[in-house]
Image (cartoon, grey):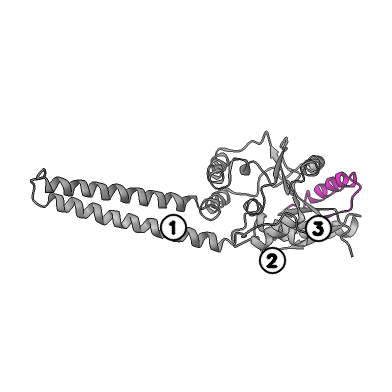
């Protein structure tokens, strides 16, 4: 039996009882214009309000093909989205926010870009988004590490995206305890495109992400999602070890040439420099091993097929 669903809209949601119906209705209006069969997959990230009952009402009372799931506890947006990927049946999967921050009227723009370029992922790139000081700083930190690890264009996306089904399913297979979806995509494809879209304020008004959530997420991206810190430590360790060894040899030569007359001065300096040099060299070696272990436990795929005969 062939799959009759063309588009799957995955919406991770949390405490959205007062506006999830508006979101679903606007998405339904826009996708009906395509004339293709679609489904809306809503993942309730263990909301503490009436969101789950509202999802059940929408499924019972609307004509839309709605799939719903409620997580046992609050796992966060990325894991909720991965749960939606697991349930999605469409050839193309559209991920959106639950409060209309992702404008449903722009869905067709992303679909047109995907169709024209045959991209595996098309992101909405918000051109006028405004952030507070703390959010701007955390985003700036993330961009630095993302650029170093993944390239300039990898940091311009958002949670409003169109993804091919095979890539979404592959992301589930590669996900680990730290599930950062966009990095999972980058592991498997470089066929990524962006569409400039004007950002609009969501119905929620205030983001669910607290300052501490942003700090924790940025820290995990730096330490778990990137091997840049390990490479920096390895480089510093090797460089400082080499410098210490050279300075140590310099003092040995000066002592042998009679340029140092103070008793015990050369031996003290040389012993300090060589011992710290060995420590730094050992740190560099440990950093290299940690780097290899880091890459192994991340479950990075050996390769990713695009087509197969």
Quickly name the residue at label 2: 72
- Sequence-first disc among 2 and 3: 3
Q: CA distance from mark 1 to mark 3?
A: 49 Å
Q: Are the residues tagged 1 and 3 within 8 Å (C-beta)?
A: no
List x then y, in percent, for residue 70.
74, 63
Q: Nearest the camera: 22 or 248?
A: 248
Q: In the image, is residue 23 part of the stretch drawn in magenta?
A: yes
Q: Which element carries disc 1, helix, strand or loop?
A: helix
- Magenta highlight range: 16-40
* Disc with the residue nearer the chain's start (1 vs 3): 3
Disc 3 packing (10 Å; few <14; some 14–19; many ≥20): many
Q: Is residue 151 magenta?
A: no
User: Residue under circle 3?
Assistant: 55
Does residue 61 appear in the picture of this structure? yes
x and y percentages locating residue 278 in the rendered image: 30, 57
Q: Secondary structure at mark 3?
A: helix
Lower sequence index among marks 1 and 2: 2
Q: Is residue 160 above or below residue 72?
A: above
Please name the residue shown 20% across and 46% down the image: 250
Q: Position of residue 19 (x, y in %)?
A: 78, 48
Q: Residue at x 67, y 51 (%)?
A: 189
Q: Which residue is the extreme one toward the front?
A: 309
């Amino acid at each position: 039996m062939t799959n009759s669903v063309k588009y799957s809209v995955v919406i991770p949601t949390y405490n959205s009882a007062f506006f999830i119906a508006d979101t679903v209705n606007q998405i339904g209006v826009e996708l009906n214009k395509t004339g293709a069969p679609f489904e809306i997959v809503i993942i309730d990230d263990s909301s503490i309000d009436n969101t789950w009952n509202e999802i059940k009402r929408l499924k019972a009372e609307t004509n839309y093909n709605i799939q719903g799931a409620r997580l046992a506890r609050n796992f966060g947006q990325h894991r909720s989205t991965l749960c939606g990927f697991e349930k999605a049946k469409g050839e193309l999967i559209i991920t959106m926010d639950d409060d209309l921050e992702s404008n449903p009227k722009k869905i067709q723009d992303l679909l047109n870009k995907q169709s024209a370029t045959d991209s595996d992922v098309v992101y909405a790139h918000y051109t006028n988004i405004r952030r507070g000081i703390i959010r701007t700083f955390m985003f700036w930190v993330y961009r630095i590490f993302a650029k170093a690890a993944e390239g300039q264009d990898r940091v311009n996306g958002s949670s409003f995206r169109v993804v091919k089904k095979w890539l979404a399913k592959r992301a589930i297979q590669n996900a680990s305890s730290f599930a950062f979806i966009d990095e999972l995509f980058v592991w498997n494809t470089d066929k990524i495109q962006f569409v400039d879209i004007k950002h609009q304020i969501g119905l929620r008004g205030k983001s669910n992400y607290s300052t501490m959530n942003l700090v924790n997420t940025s820290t995990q991206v730096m330490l778990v999602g990137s091997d840049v810190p390990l490479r920096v430590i390895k480089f510093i360790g090797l460089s400082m070890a080499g410098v210490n060894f050279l300075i140590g040899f310099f003092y040995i030569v000066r002592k042998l040439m009679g340029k140092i007359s103070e008793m015990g001065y050369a031996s003290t300096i040389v012993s300090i420099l060589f011992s710290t040099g060995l420590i730094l060299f050992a740190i560099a070696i440990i950093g290299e091993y940690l780097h290899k272990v880091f890459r192994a436990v991340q479950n990075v795929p050996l390769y990713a097929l695009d087509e197969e005969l």
